[in-house]
Amino acid sequence: MTIDIIGAGIGGLTTAIALEQKGFKTRIFEQAENIKPIGAGIILANNAMQVYEKLGLRKIIEENGNPISSLNITKANLKPLSKIDLSYFEKKFKVKNIAIHRGLLQQILIDKLNSSSLKLNHKLRKVTKNTNGHSLEFQNGEKIQSSTLIAADGLNSIVRQNLFLNNSIRNANQICWRGITEYNLPQKYQNELNEAWGKSERFGFVQIAKNKVYWYALKSFRKNNEEFNVNNIENYFFEYDNIIKNIISSTKKEQINTAEISDLKPTNIWYKENICLIGDAAHATTPNIGQGACQAIEDAYVLSECLKKHDTHNAFKEFQKIRLPKAHQVVNASWMIGKIAHLTNPILIGIRNQMIRMTPPSINRKQSEQIFQLASL
Ligand SMILES: Cc1cc2nc3c(=O)[nH]c(=O)nc-3n(C[C@H](O)[C@H](O)[C@H](O)COP(=O)(O)OP(=O)(O)OC[C@H]3O[C@@H](n4cnc5c(N)ncnc54)[C@H](O)[C@@H]3O)c2cc1C
């Protein structure tokens, strides 16, 4: 059986690798002419790294990234509000959280593809049902027949828009800048992700390799983001710690990526006949708990196991049953954290910070454990 995958993002590529390793033949169709990921990093949390361990990719990802042993929320001056110590999970699951350049990760995944064919410059334009499955029409004029289709084409999935009813994309009214700069953090920050919360904005940074820091900054907007300009980022964070100001000023402005933050309102139907949505196409989340790609990676693992055990229809049914509750838990938690992080009222900010400080580490650990634990299959 040949399985067709739309989209060569982290979700589509990981799915192709997982399926190949189970003996399936796959074809991946990607709209881009070249794989050119944005200049940003990504944090592969413990759950994602457990999957990559199973796929034989843990070592190479570790070699190309930087281990993160603590996730911290701080005030704008980097005074800690909460700290999640990851060593407990490293021992329990025997893998680390890794921060890595997105481009490197994508290249590692492409290099691992073996029998799958990756077809670039194939932007899917239309999917139509017919008696043998579905007909896929591409912008380049090509038309192919597909018997089994996995849609890993992201938040704005054309497959979802063509064939599934619920397509409610929610704009979080937050603008996000991401950048990478040549910088070495002070020793104490080298193996931590720090996210500093202020007043309707926040700034996260992490070392992803020697002399490379990945950072992201988010700011709320009311009606549209036009009032914000990438050249003014320093001004938006002028009250933040000097490390943050240095990171911003050392980044080349033309290399900063700007995007609005959105997610997909949770939807309960991810599959239809021989088509299944995965990753952001099925459950795009805001990036507030750094789990979007990790959830896509979990999808890849669970879906490949299901396809190995069941016929296509039952595999998709079982996949949705296993994955939907956790993916929706992530979407909902992340949406709520995005709101809490961007409070503007100083009294509410004070209460929020006090509550974060007082949350017992055992509660933070329990919440992380629910996310890091893979489904037992
Ligand atoms: C600011 C920010 C920070 C984030 N940080 C993290 C993090 O630290 N950790 C984490 O786990 N997640 C993070 N995420 C989320 C993560 O980036 C996404 O969840 C993840 O990339 C989803 O992967 P995907 O493969 O499902 O979709 P995508 O990455 O969107 O890939 C979809 C692919 O499909 C292709 N495509 C789209 N339409 C078509 C078409 N019609 N025909 C052919 N190809 C098509 C696209 O070109 C693309 O290659 C972050 C997101 C943001 C916005």
Image (cartoon, grey):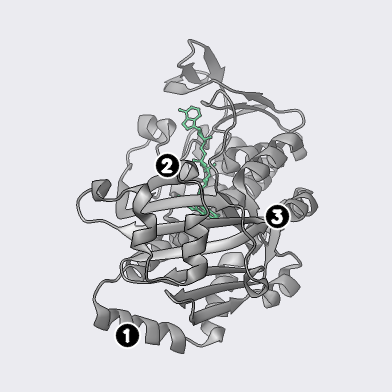
Which numbered circle lies on residue 351? 1
Q: Residue at x 64, y 40 (%)?
A: 106
Secondary element at tag 1: helix
Residue 268 position within the rendered picture, expressed as x and y whole percent measured from the top left: 40, 50
Q: Could you tell whether 188 is left or right of 274 in the image? A: right
- In space, the residues marked 2 and 1 are separated at their CA atoms by 34 Å
The quadrant of the image that shows the N terminus is top right
Q: Residue at x 55, y 27 (%)?
A: 30
Can you tell me whether the CB of the residue at mark 2 lies under 8 Å from the nearest atom of ligand 1?
A: yes
- In space, the residues marked 1 and 3 are separated at their CA atoms by 37 Å
Q: Earlier in the sequence, mark 1 or mark 3?
A: 3
Residue 227 position within the rendered picture, expressed as x and y whole percent measured from the top left: 24, 50
Q: Earlier in the sequence, mark 2 or mark 1?
A: 2
Secondary element at tag 3: loop
Going by the numbered disc 2, the residue's amino acid type is Leu
Q: Which residue is mark 2?
A: 155
**Frontmost residue, 337 versus 341:** 341
Q: Which residue is mark 3?
A: 65
- When asked about the image quadrant of residue 112, the answer is top right
- Dots 2, 1 in contact, CB < 8 A: no
Which numbered circle lies on residue 210? none
Going by the numbered disc 3, the residue's amino acid type is Gly
Q: Residue at x 69, y 77 (%)?
A: 88
Give neighbour class at mark 2: few <14, some 14-19, many 20+ (Cα, 10 Å): some
